Image (cartoon, rainbow, N blue to C red):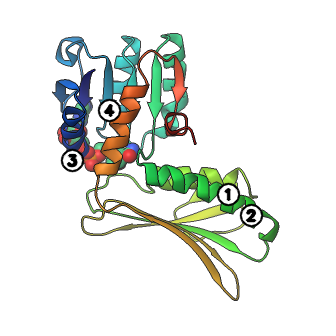
């Protein structure tokens, strides 16, 4: 497959290596707004840029009927608009707040636990925590938002906030330290005990491999997708 990488920072560079190892051609590595000429006729674009540039980049590719796998976080309020553009242009769009297999299993585990805890909401207070490297531009992480959304499906929590949990607002603590690639925990605390589930990424390779697997899966499909469909979870 011919893959164009839009955003060639920490993630773009690792994705490049993994794409080559899996036998793909990387036809463009862009650190700037794409044009058709610069994209060089790819089968699919993988977008890992910045919260400010992601929407425009993805929109441009979809309007030119190029499928997009997007991993950039921090722009999600505009995702419904992108999903509309994908459908209007009969192209595929796949967003993953986190592409690693482990985190996608963790998402499923989180939903299952939320379902089990639903009858005990008066006894247990839920709180999320995410830890990332100091260069991360957005907070909370896209992954933490996905975890919160999984909990909303099975509880009375309705929104999240960067603070302690209060009433229907699920609290997320965002910690920035060192070069941590990404650690996410869900806590249920009562007066007498605590249940914790935690995912720790050791490096970025799992995210990058998942993005390439998603890029192998997407071309030819029309509509809006996530890793759930790719991994069959
Ligand atoms: N979904 C996932 O699994 C996952 C995993 C890790 C990181 N991320 C997200 O991916 C994004 C990138 O992460 P990173 O660690 O590679 O960041 P990074 O800062 O190392 O790289 C971002 C790159 O985008 C480039 N860029 C800036 N403006 C651009 C534009 N207009 N068009 C194209 N490129 C542009 C920058 O020059 C930079 O090289 C972040 O939003 C991060 O949160 C997602």
Question: Of the residues under marks 2 and 4, which one precedes in the sequence?
Answer: 4
Q: Which of 27 and 73 is in front in this view?
A: 27
Residue 73 can be seen in this image: no
**Picture disc at residue 60:** none
**Residue 201 x %, y %:** 36, 60
Name the front one of labels 3 and 2: 2
| Residue on which disc 1 sits | 112
- Circle 3 residue: 10
- Residue occupying image coordinates x 56% and y 60%: 161
* Residue 83 x, y percent position in the rendering: 53, 24
Q: How far apart are marks 4 and 1 (CA)?
A: 31 Å
Mark 4 falls on what kind of element? strand
Asked if labels 1 and 4 touch by Cβ distance under 8 angstroms, the answer is no
Mark 3 CB within 8 Å of ligand 1: yes
Task: From the image, tell me which residue sits under label 2.
Answer: 116
Question: Considering only vertical position in the picture, is 198 above or below 72?
Answer: below
Residue at 65% across, 55% down = 111
Specify the label residue 47 is tagged with.
Answer: 4
Q: Do the residues labelled 1 and 3 touch (CB within 8 Å)?
A: no
The x and y percentages for residue 128 are 54, 66
SS class of the residue under badge 2? helix
Q: Is residue 47 above or below residue 84?
A: below
Q: Say if disc 4 is inside 8 Å of ligand 1.
A: yes
- Up the image or down, 3 lies above or below 106; here it is above
Could you give the CA–CA distance between mark 3 and mark 4, rounded to whole angstroms?
Answer: 12 Å
Quadrant where the N terminus is found in the figure: top left
SS under mark 3: helix
Upstream in sequence: badge 3 or badge 2: 3
């Amino acid at each position: 497959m011919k893959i164009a990488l839009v955003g060639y920072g920490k993630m773009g560079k690792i994705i490049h290596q993994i794409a080559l190892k899996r036998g793909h051609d990387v036809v463009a590595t862009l650190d700037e707004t794409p044009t058709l000429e610069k994209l060089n006729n790819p089968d699919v674009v993988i977008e890992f840029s910045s919260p400010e540039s992601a929407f425009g980049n993805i929109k441009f590719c979809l309007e030119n009927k190029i499928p997009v796998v997007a991993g950039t976080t921090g722009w999600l309020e505009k995702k419904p608009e992108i999903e509309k553009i994908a459908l209007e242009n009969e192209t595929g769009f796949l967003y993953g707040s986190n592409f690693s297999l482990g985190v996608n299993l963790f998402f499923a585990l989180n939903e299952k636990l939320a379902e089990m805890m639903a009858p005990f909401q008066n006894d247990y207070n839920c709180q999320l925590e995410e830890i990332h490297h100091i260069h991360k531009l957005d907070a909370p992480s896209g992954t933490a938002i996905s975890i919160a959304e999984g909990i909303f499906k099975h509880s009375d929590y309705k929104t999240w906030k960067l603070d302690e949990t209060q009433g229907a607002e699920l609290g997320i603590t965002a910690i920035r330290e060192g070069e941590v690639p990404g650690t996410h925990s869900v806590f249920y605390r009562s007066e007498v005990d605590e249940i914790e589930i935690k995912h720790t990424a050791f490096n970025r390779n799992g995210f990058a491999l998942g993005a390439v697997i998603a890029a192998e899966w997407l071309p030819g499909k029309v509509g809006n997708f996530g890793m759930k469909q790719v991994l069959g979870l």
